[in-house]
Amino acid sequence: MNSRPNSFRSGPDERGHFGMFGGRFVAETLMPLILDLEKAYAEAKADPAFQREMNGYLKDYVGRPSPLYFAERLTEHLGGAKVYLKREELNHTGSHKVNNVLGQIMVARRMGKKRIIAETGAGQHGVATATLCARFGLDCVVYMGAVDVARQEPNVIRMEMLGATVVPVQSGTRTLKDAMNEALRDWVTNVHDTFYCIGTVAGPHPYPMMVRDFQSVIGHETRTQMMEAEGRLPDSLIACIGGGSNAMGLFHPFLDDSSVEIFGVEAAGHGLDKLHAASLTGGRPGVLHGNRTYLLMNDDGQIQDAHSISAGLDYPGIGPEHSWLHETGRVTYLSATDEEALAAFQLLSRLEGIIPALESAHAIARVIELAPARASDHLMVVNLSGRGDKDVPQVGDILKGRKTT
Amino acid sequence: MTTRIDTRFAELQAQGRSAFVTFLMAGDPDPATSLAIIKALPQAGADVIEIGMPFTDPMADGPAIQAAGLRALKAGMTLVKTLDLVRAFRKDDDTTPIVLMGYYNPIYIHGVDRFLTEARQAGVDGLIIVDLPPEEDDELCLPAMRAGLNFIRLATPTTDDRRLPAVLANTSGFVYYVSITGITGAAAANATQVGDAVARIKRHTALPVCVGFGIRTPDAARDIARAANGAVVGTALVDALAKSLDSEGRATTGTVKAVADLAASLAQGVRGAARAAE
């Protein structure tokens, strides 16, 4: 599978395939709408007025560009590579999720859809969706696993304050995958007026491509900002991966720059030999939620429970383009355990005065290992995809011994 | 090539009546009870038997069929055991068509070619795979046709005239019209709208059209059977099964009878319909 394509940035093909991954594995009821969406998105992408309007909201509503910040004390502490943080946690709503939601809501408006549904794990995508629905006066229903509703309560309250209806999902494992199942069931039922705003680079074509395009603003800005700061490209990029949208947004503009090393960090949960959420490391290719990709499953093809301390990474799959980048070898996929993420969460808080989301702390955890092994002129960019406010109650309880991971 | 499905619909056509199609989940609530139920269905009046292949993440199913799948998985059901179930059924019945219905991943993991060979040997006649639209025909539909199995496609209210030819192109056996936009067990179908939709599909195909989703009672089954070549009942049968279980979700002495009795009364409804729409 290691045949090297001419470009890593040309996918997907017209059927939504990245190599063998991706595709459109959905019920017939949804197919006509998915084809309409593909067309509407292609038209929007080619429309300068759409780009202009989106750039206006990205600047004045989201607060872009997000800074590329030299983490001086973290760099000193680690004693190796020069570590920069791409500050996506400073965006309105506190994570990278808003970049994608803004784009999709603008497409939904072009399509005349009045009702928006979304799935959410940590609640960051749900909050971003609720926020933009409030801004544009659209009905919003967010599906969230009942387990996640309990462990990410601040975000549930935020979504409700923004006028969204949060539906706790009681089926299956009551986490992100079940929230996605339930959102798909809603969509099949209300397909005539409803737009499904998927929060990551997964789902049926064109979602993985569309979400990647909207998130690529992260990588494009990083490129410009690093040229301004250092006069050259970064040497390495690191981001955490659940479905993988923040990572894809950072990576994609650099995929054809062969000098740039790229690392994705999956959630190793209690450990790769125990319960975890590392689909590439511990899974194999299968078909779920509209696409073929690496999945955690048993020998009968039944999807297995994922586990991560971080609700946003607690998903047994990964975006299909990541599966392809894994098999082609362009991106190196690592993992970090709950314990390592907790340690990184505390380290960044103490050294830089930045409390990261538990999701982003997984990326920091690998920076702690990778940076010291590199020279002091090595430029390393880590995507700080979200802020940790939502995790403060949960981490506080764990640190005081009131809860386990 | 003629399958048991083709033969059965030709017989029904000659008799001037529509098909009663049942759906139950393989291995629900346990493999032995499931086999006893499926064996009882032809006697109760089922003309075609659909058997669900349990899957952890049934995206197009409502709570009743989700729960049925989880009961089956908990009882140790697998794709291999589902094929065993069909094989056991075939020992006594070589004419009632069996259609396996479910999601693609377990088949993909088992291996498409291996699955098709084993399914055909076990006595399976057709497949309905919810998450394989015509855009993914290379995956399973075309290999299934080559292996001599019918690939039965779902058409829905959102499948418009522009799209119907693509949906029907590689469909065989019959067309399954999903009468509502929604998941299994949700809203009831309106017989007039269903009649219009069936007529629309028949302008594009000579295949029989069966209608499912939302049919719960003998009267509704009769109305749909008048409008189509077959009425599919799933959730109502699964509900009857679920109600017969004990508090631990295990089969009781009344389980097989509860399902067979409801199937018999639904079959009466279908047989009470006038000659089906041509």
Image (cartoon, coloured by chain):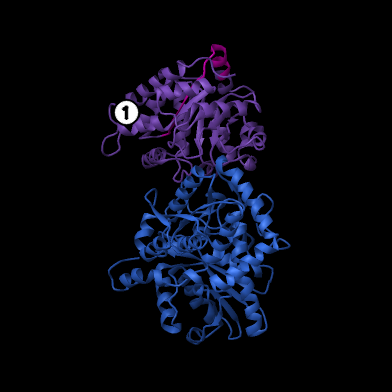
Q: Residues within 10 Å of mark 1 (few under 14, many from 20)?
A: many
* Residue B187: x %, y % from top left: 44, 36
Evaluate whether residue B123 shows in this view.
Answer: no
Using the image, name the chain to which the residue with label 1 belongs: B
Looking at the image, residue B245 sits to the left or right of residue B67; the answer is left
Look at chain A in the picture and name its colour.
blue
Looking at this view, name the residue that lies furthest to the top: B15
* Residue B262: x %, y % from top left: 37, 24
Looking at the image, residue A110 sits to the left or right of residue B270; the answer is right
Q: Image quadrant of residue B137?
A: top right
Asked if the stretch drawn in magenta spans residue B14, the answer is yes
Look at chain B in the picture and name its colour.
purple
Question: Where does the C terminus of chain A fall, quadrant-wise?
Answer: bottom left
Above or below, comparing residue A83 to residue B246 in the picture? below
Looking at this view, name the residue that lies furthest to the left: B247
Evaluate whether residue A370 shows in this view.
Answer: yes
Q: Report which residue position mark 1 lands on.
A: B255
* Residue B266: x %, y % from top left: 41, 22
- Kind of residue at badge 1: Thr
Looking at the image, residue A113 sits to the left or right of residue B236; the answer is right
Residue closer to the observer: B135 or B49: B135
Above or below, comparing residue A362 to residue A79 in the picture? above
Q: How many marks?
A: 1
Q: Give the range drawn in magenta.
A: B9-26
Looking at this view, name the residue that lies furthest to the right: A6
- The residue depicted at 63 percent of the width and 66 percent of the height is A53
Residue closer to the observer: B79 or A384: A384
- The residue depicted at 43 percent of the width and 67 percent of the height is A337
